Amino acid sequence: MERDGRWLLIKRGRQEAHAAGTLAGIGGKAEADGAGIGILEQTARREVAEEVGVDLTGTDLTYVAGDYFTTDDGDPVINVVFRGELPPQARPVAAAPDEEAEAHPDCPPWVLRSLRRMA
């Protein structure tokens, strides 16, 4: 999510199996009950609502990139990146409001690559 040239990131919990404690884009897993046309966009909207309390109904999401990787635990992941403008009325809490992602010690290189693609 972007507003005025700034990107909203979250900090992953220390208990997460993959990339614990790092900055990340908002994300999650598709759910079987949401299967069908537009499942990726539906998943993105649901995850943003769950993780930062922002309703993206009516917000255009633009596909940026798709990647595949395997976690350290061997779990296969398809990572799909969308770009969208944060609605003007939205007031999420930023993970690191006073820091730039590039200088943040918890920002992994794959997040920086996604941010560069979205810009």
Image (cartoon, grey):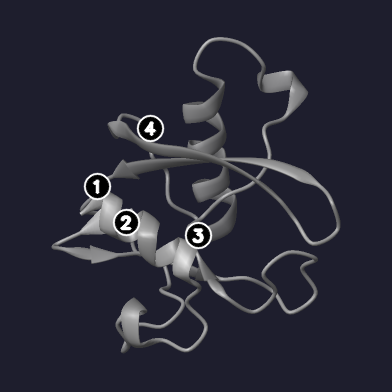
Q: Residues within 10 Å of mark 4 (few under 14, many from 20)?
A: few
Instruction: Report, in whole angstroms, how far the alpha carbon at label 1 lies from the one at label 2.
Output: 10 Å
Which residue bears the numbered disc 4? 57
Establish if 28 lies above or below 90: above
Residue 86 visible to an observer of this rendering: no
Instruction: Report, in whole angstroms, how far the alpha carbon at label 3 lies from the one at label 4.
Output: 14 Å
Q: Earlier in the sequence, mark 2 or mark 4?
A: 4
Instruction: Report, in whole angstroms, how far the alpha carbon at label 2 lies from the one at label 3.
Output: 10 Å
Tell me what residue is drawn at x 49 percent, y 17 percent.
38
Query: At label 1, which amino acid type do we have?
Result: Glu
Q: Tag on residue 44? A: none
Q: Earlier in the sequence, mark 1 or mark 2?
A: 1
Q: Nearer the viewer, residue 89 or 85?
A: 85
Q: Residues within 10 Å of mark 2 (few under 14, many from 20)?
A: few
Establish if 24 lies above or below 59: below
Q: Residues within 10 Å of mark 3 (few under 14, many from 20)?
A: some
- Residue 16 percent coordinates (x, y): 77, 68
Q: Tag on residue 85? A: 1
Looking at the rendered structure, the secondary structure element under dot 3 is helix
Q: Earlier in the sequence, mark 2 or mark 3?
A: 3
Q: Tag on residue 90? A: 2
Quarter of the rendering containing residue 13? bottom right
- Residue 3 percent coordinates (x, y): 20, 59
Query: At label 3, which amino acid type do we have?
Result: Val
- Residue 73 as seen in the image, left or right of residue 111: right
Query: At label 4, which amino acid type do we have?
Result: Thr
Tell me what residue is drawn at x 59 percent, y 51 percent.
50
Instruction: Report, in whole angstroms, how far the alpha carbon at label 1 lies from the one at label 3.
Output: 14 Å
